């Protein structure tokens, strides 16, 4: 009963191009969404978040889009850099609880 | 300042043994979380502490798993009678207040291998 899904286990992109990572969720109670980035042998680090009252949040090269009706969010990285190569996890939480629900991750490789 | 630290970084044990995993959260953070990450999966919630008390332990898989945070800072995750299926990376995270929008800061994890 995976409530947060990332259907693409991996993605390769040329340096300078746009990377688009997708995430779907099933629980309509989720109202806060985050993206975490993880390098090997390190813990996940927070990247960007979005509240359900918004449909877009931007931070430098990173933009998160939320489509509540489709229960879908995406992370755009423009332009992609080799240092962005990592595993990206989508996570969601609800105001009724306190835990984050994570997707299975997408491994991004940015090719120089 | 210092981030979340976890010890040991790696633990190899034999089936049936008892293990303890330690987490030092960021100073001043009242909320502490334990997650388990199996191969190819995302972090899976185990337990959440607010101060010294376990506010939500709904993610603990069975009664072999137990966690404490006696002084509201350091936490220890304890696993009794380990099984091969317990092999995973155990992640600890802390946040300032524990609200649902509070950023959780993760440690590097402890990789547990049960032989």
Image: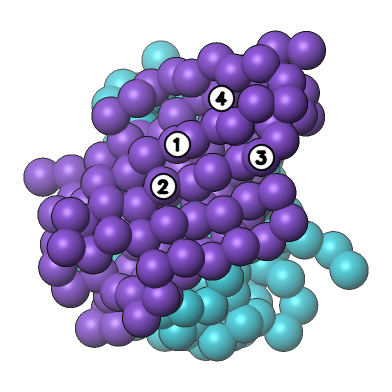
Q: Given contact means CB atoms under 8 Å apart, are the residues at marks 4 and 1 in contact?
A: yes
- Tell which circle, 4 or 1, labels the residue nearer the N-terminal end: 1
Q: Which chain is purple?
A: A
Q: Which residue is mark 1?
A: A21
Q: Secondary structure at mark 4?
A: strand
The lab-note entry on whether marks 3 and 4 share a chain reads: yes
Asked whether residue B47 is in view, the answer is: no
What is the C-alpha distance between the residues marked 3 and 1? 12 Å
**Circle 1 sits in a helix, a strand or a loop, which is it?**
strand
Horizontal relation, residue B9 to residue A9: left or right = right
User: Which residue carries the number 3 mark?
Assistant: A78
Q: Nearer the viewer, mark 2 or mark 3?
A: 3
Question: According to the rendering, which colour does chain B have?
Answer: cyan
> In the displayed structure, would residue A5 be above or below residue B27?
above
Q: Callout 3: residue from which chain?
A: A
Question: Which image quarter is the N terminus of chain B in?
Answer: bottom right
- Mark 3 or mark 4, which is nearer to you? 3
Comparing B74 with B56, the one in front is B56
At x 21%, y 56%, the residue is A71
Whether the residues at callouts 4 and 2 have beta carbons within 8 Å, the answer is: no
Q: Residues within 10 Å of mark 4 (few under 14, many from 20)?
A: many
């Amino acid at each position: 009963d995976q409530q947060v899904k990332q259907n693409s286990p991996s993605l390769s992109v040329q340096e300078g191009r746009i990377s688009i990572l997708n995430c779907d969720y099933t629980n309509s109670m989720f109202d806060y969404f985050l993206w975490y980035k993880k390098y090997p042998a390190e813990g996940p680090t927070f990247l960007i978040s979005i509240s359900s009252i918004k449909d877009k949040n931007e931070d430098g090269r990173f933009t998160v889009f939320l489509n509540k009706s489709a229960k879908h969010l995406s992370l755009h990285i423009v332009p992609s850099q080799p240092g962005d190569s990592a595993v990206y996890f989508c996570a969601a939480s609800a105001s009724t609880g306190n835990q984050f629900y994570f997707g299975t991750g997408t491994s991004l490789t940015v090719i120089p | 300042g210092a981030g979340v630290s976890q010890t040991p970084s790696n633990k190899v044990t034999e089936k049936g043994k008892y293990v303890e995993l330690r987490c030092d959260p960021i100073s001043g953070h009242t909320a502490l979380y334990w997650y388990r990450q199996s191969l190819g999966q995302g972090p899976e919630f185990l337990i959440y502490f607010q101060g010294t008390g376990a506010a939500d332990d709904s993610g603990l898989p069975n009664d072999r798993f137990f966690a404490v945070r006696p002084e509201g800072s350091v936490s220890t995750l304890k696993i009794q009678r380990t099984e091969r299926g317990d092999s995973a990376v155990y992640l600890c995270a802390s946040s300032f207040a524990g609200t649902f929008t509070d950023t959780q800061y993760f440690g590097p994890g402890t990789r547990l291998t049960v032989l």
